Every structure is written in structure tokens, then in C-alpha cells.
Image (tube, rainbow, N blue to C red):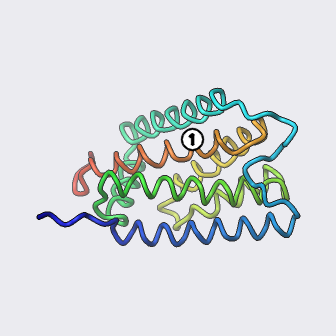
Amino acid sequence: MEQPKFPGNVVVKGFMVYAVFTFLALIWGGLRGDFNLLYLDEQKNLNLWHDTLMGAGCGLTVVFLSRLLHHYFQTFRTLNRDFKQILGPLSTTDCLLLSFFSAIGEELFFRGAMQPSIGLVLTSLIFGLMHTGGKRYIPWTISALVLGFVLGAMANYSGNLLAPIIAHFTINYFNLLFLQKIKTNTSN
């Protein structure tokens, strides 16, 4: 009988990191006197279909742009190979779990707790700087900075975190799946 496959070490570490982000977001919200981190503007009604489609559309657009950058620029192919080597092999379930944990943890922390306190610009700058790793990873940092503004603007526009969470999940999930398909020893 085949044993069930448990998530890999990267997934466990990811869960722990994003659990800390969620915990810190709750503390920040509590200190602010507002544990409801999912709504930035209680005056705006949740529009489930609109916000879901906005998040999915944004996420898929970013995924498409990621593929174009990978196809046309060696810098992005190198970056993707580096990430694949850092993360190691991931199953579809691993990609799903990592994407879910990061979307929830980062959006609760950055857009739910931080952004209402210090604003869109400073939050986006910090979000970009949290995605660093030296000169080699500058394209990743720049794209995270731009995405910080996009995700933050979606949160401000909708008044809640549904669209940014869905966009963040979509981007991470499809990009992690893509990393599993690229070869690490060619310019593919």
C-alpha cells in the first residue's frame, strides 16, 4: 500500500513563515484596535464576483507577463532557474499550499495590517524590499514593488482583501507550477 505523500520541507517552512506573518498582522490589527484585517473600508460592500474576477484577472495578467519576460529575457530565465534550485522539486499540492499560505499571510500583513496604518506607498516599498536577495534578484524586487502597488490599489479600490489575495495566490501558484517545468541546466 502506498504511503500518503506529505508536503515537503519547503512547504512546512513556508507555513511557519506565513503563520508568523499572520500572527504579526493580528497583533498589529489588535494594537490598532481593529482585528478585522479583511476589510479596509467597511463602507464599501463586498462584491464577491467583481472582486474575485478582478483578482483572478490581475493574477493571470501578471502570470502572462511573467511568461513573456521569461521567454524574451535571459535575466528572467536565470532568475527562474535560481528559484527552482532554491525551492527544489515541488508537487502540485506543494505549489497549491505554498501559494495559499503566502497569499493569506502576506496580504493580511501588508495590505490588511500595514497599509491602513502607514499607507499604500510605504507599504509597497517595504513589500518590494522584503523580496530581495542581492543584485542578482533585482528584477524580482522590482516586480514585487510594482505588484505591491497593484495589490494595494486593488485593496483600496475594493475596500477588502479578496481581490489581492486571489491575485497573489494566482500569481504564485501558476509561477510555482511553471518553475517545475523549466530545466535548470539550459537557457529554457
Q: Where residue 17 sits: x, y (%)? A: 54, 70
The C terminus appears in which quarter of the rendering?
A: top left
Q: Where residue 116 sits: x, y (%)? A: 83, 53
Determine which quarter of the picture holds residue 155: top right
User: Is 179 placed left or right of 186 in the picture?
Assistant: right
Q: Where residue 146 sits: x, y (%)? A: 64, 45
Residue occupying the far left of the picture: 1
Residue pictured at 87% horizontal, 64% vertical? 32
The N terminus appears in which quarter of the rendering?
A: bottom left
Q: Nearer the viewer, residue 154 or 25?
A: 25
User: Is 20 placed left or right of 157 in the picture?
Assistant: left
Which residue in the structure is indicated by mark 1? 167
Element under disc 1: helix
Determine which quarter of the picture holds residue 27: bottom right
What amino acid is at disc 1?
Ala
Residue pictured at 77% horizontal, 47% vertical? 39
Q: Nearer the viewer, residue 11 or 81?
A: 11
Residue pictured at 36% horizontal, 64% vertical? 87
Residue occupying the far front of the picture: 1
Q: Nearer the viewer, residue 181 or 161?
A: 161
